[in-house]
Image (cartoon, helix red, strand yellow):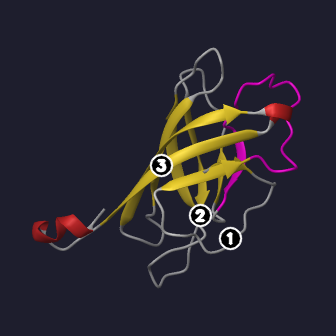
Amino acid sequence: LLCQAAETPGGEKEAEATNTKWWQGQQQKHPTRSGKCVLSGWWENDLGSKMLVSTVDRQGNFTGTYHTAVSSTGKPIKPCTLVGSQHLDKDGQCTFGFTVNWEKFSDSTAVFVGQCFAGDGGKEVLKTSWLLREKVDSESSDWKAT
């Protein structure tokens, strides 16, 4: 679950799960949204990870930065680039997906898919599912890589 968050990233421990909820923070108000979800801005999930999504272009494409709260590597966590696409529809309750390459501290890649929901009072919630693929040494180890 992803939720729009405050202006600065921070982190806490993230549970091992494939479903995540993100929500809007108190400092991200968009008075002209009129019930439509807008992905651009800071988002924080219920597990402590944060992301910044840049402006979504007319084709629905966007980039941003993901600040994970956890890592299984012994290396320091660093923000990583995300690249995504949003399905643009009239009601604003859009589906989207993005990929994060953890190139700065891990040999893994994660993909997220989800939908944005605009609730009462302009609160936006992103419901997502994700997969993480880690590099393995051989094809016989493939089963434990995702």
**Where residue 86 sits in the image (x, y, percent)?**
54, 30
Residue 98 x, y percent position in the rendering: 48, 43
- What amino acid is labelled 1 in the image? Gly
Instruction: Give the magenta-colored segment's residue range.
Output: 24-46
- The residue labelled by disc 2 is 79
Does 7 appear above or below 53? below
Q: Few, some or many C-alpha atoms within 10 Å of disc 2 (few <14, some 14-19, many ≥20)?
A: some
Along the polypeptide, which appears first: circle 2 or circle 3? 2
> Is label 1 in a helix, a strand or a loop?
loop
Farthest residue to the front: give it.
Answer: 120
Q: Residue at x 25, y 69 (%)?
A: 144
Q: CA distance from mark 3 to mark 1?
A: 20 Å
Of the numbered discs 1 and 2, the one sitting upstream in the chain is 1
Nearer to me, 141 or 138:
141
Q: Residue at x 58, y 65 (%)?
A: 68
Q: Residue at left 45%, top 63%?
A: 102
**Secondary structure beneath disc 2?**
loop
Mark before the other along the chain sequence, 3 or 1:
1
Camera-side mark, 2 or 3: 3
29 over 141 or under it: above or below: above
Looking at the rendered image, the quarter that the C terminus falls into is bottom left
| Badge 1: residue crowd in 10 Å (few <14, some 14–19, many ≥20) | some
| Residue in front for this viewpoint, 76 or 145 | 145
Location of mark 3 (residue): 129
Tell me if residue 28 is in the magenta stretch. Answer: yes
Q: Which residue is mark 1?
A: 11
Q: Nearer the viewer, mark 3 or mark 1?
A: 3
The numbered disc on residue 58 is none
Q: CA distance from mark 2 to mark 3?
A: 20 Å
Q: Amino acid at mark 3?
A: Ser
